[in-house]
Amino acid sequence: MLSLAKPLLLFLLAGLCEIGGGYLMWQWLKADRPAWVGVMGALLLVLYGWVATWQITSFGKTYAVYGGVFVVMSIAWAWYFDGFRPDRLDVIGGIVCFAGIGIILF
């Protein structure tokens, strides 16, 4: 189980960097936040690209699995930070993504 913890933590960290960075860029460009918010977003997006390289699997497998992680984390982020209320299909889609992650990862 410990061998699975590191890749999962890296996927979570990558997701926080990418989604957080994208969200900050969105806030800067669409919600009239100050430029430093956009700069912080850009730095997080660069960090995301670096964190993804810490995975030991191939590029294709890493990004395929991360795609599912990204979908689920994006829904959770929108729910927590934007007040978005996931509906039944959002939840089903997230479950399907988790299933895909499990199939690809194992």
Image (cartoon, rainbow, N blue to C red):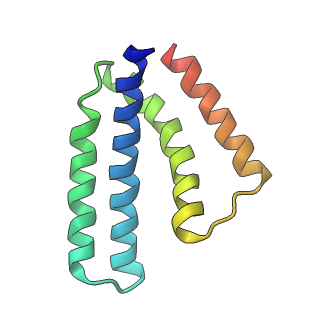
Query: Relative to 56, is 68 above or below?
Result: below
Identity of the residue drawn at 57% across and 21% down: 102
Residue 25, placed above or below residue 44: below
How many callouts does the rendering have? 0
Estimate the x, y position of residue 88 in percent, counting from the top left: 79, 51
Image position of 68 (left or right of 49): right
Q: Position of residue 25 (x, y in %)?
A: 33, 69
Outermost residue, right side: 88
Vertical relation: 92 (above or below) 32: above
Where residue 105 appears, as percent x and y from the top left, is: 49, 18
Dividing the picture into quadrants, the one containing residue 3 is: top left
The image shows residue 13 at horizontal and vertical percentages of: 34, 42
Question: Looking at the rendering, in which quadrant would you find the N terminus?
Answer: top left
Q: Residue furthest bottom?
A: 32
- The residue drawn where x is 21% and y is 51% is 46
User: Viewed as shown, does residue 73 lie left or right of 12?
Assistant: right
Q: Is residue 25 above or below residue 91?
A: below
Question: What residue appears at the point 69 percent right and 63 percent down from the top-left corner?
Answer: 85
User: Which residue is located at x 70 percent, y 57 percent?
Assistant: 86
